[in-house]
Amino acid sequence: MTAINPTKELAPQAATGEAKVNQLCSIREKYKGETGATHARRILDALKLGPLSTFEARKHLDVPHPAGRVQELREGGNEIDTLRFSERSEVGRPHCIAVYLLRKEAKQ
């Protein structure tokens, strides 16, 4: 099976690879704390840069339950699509994971 790069397919101008990891780590450091609101803020900022996978949110944003935070963001008026892709975990096992894409940010 050919590997898919959801970021390049969905947002060709978005950063990938090391550049994306650096952006996500910067967001994690900007928003300190372990509350649900802090986690949701990290995810929203990351989504403004382009698509975000469950694995990326957990590993680089330190958000243990990305789906819950995305649901809260939706309830707050943000339009976020969920796409499914097959991706291998760090131990090499294939998983069907969510990739989130911000369509429209809620008005403040």
Image (spheres, helix red, strand yellow):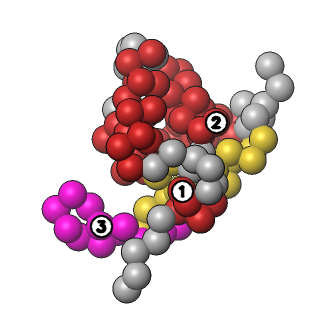
- Horizontal side of 93 relative to 25 (left or right) equals left
Q: Which residue is drawn at 31% across and 41% down?
A: 59
Quarter placement of the C terminus: top right
Q: Which residue is drawn at 63% across and 54% down?
A: 11
Q: Is residue 54 visible?
A: yes
Q: Which amino acid does label 3 sit on?
A: Arg
Q: Nearer the viewer, residue 5 or 108?
A: 5
Quarter placement of the N terminus: bottom left
Q: Is mark 3 on a helix, strand or loop?
A: strand
Quick check: marks 1 and 2 in contact, CB under 8 Å?
no
Alpha carbon separation for disc pair 1 and 2: 12 Å
Q: Where is residue 71 in the image (x, y as percent from the top left)?
A: 61, 42
Residue underneath mark 1: 7
Residue 10 included in the magenta stretch of the image:
no
Q: Where is residue 44 in the image (x, y as percent from the top left)?
A: 60, 32
Residue underneath mark 2: 48
Name the mark on residue 88: 3
Residue 88 included in the magenta stretch of the image:
yes
- Horizontal side of 33 relative to 89 (left or right) equals right
Q: Which residue is drawn at 47% across and 65% down?
A: 5
Name the mark on residue 38: none
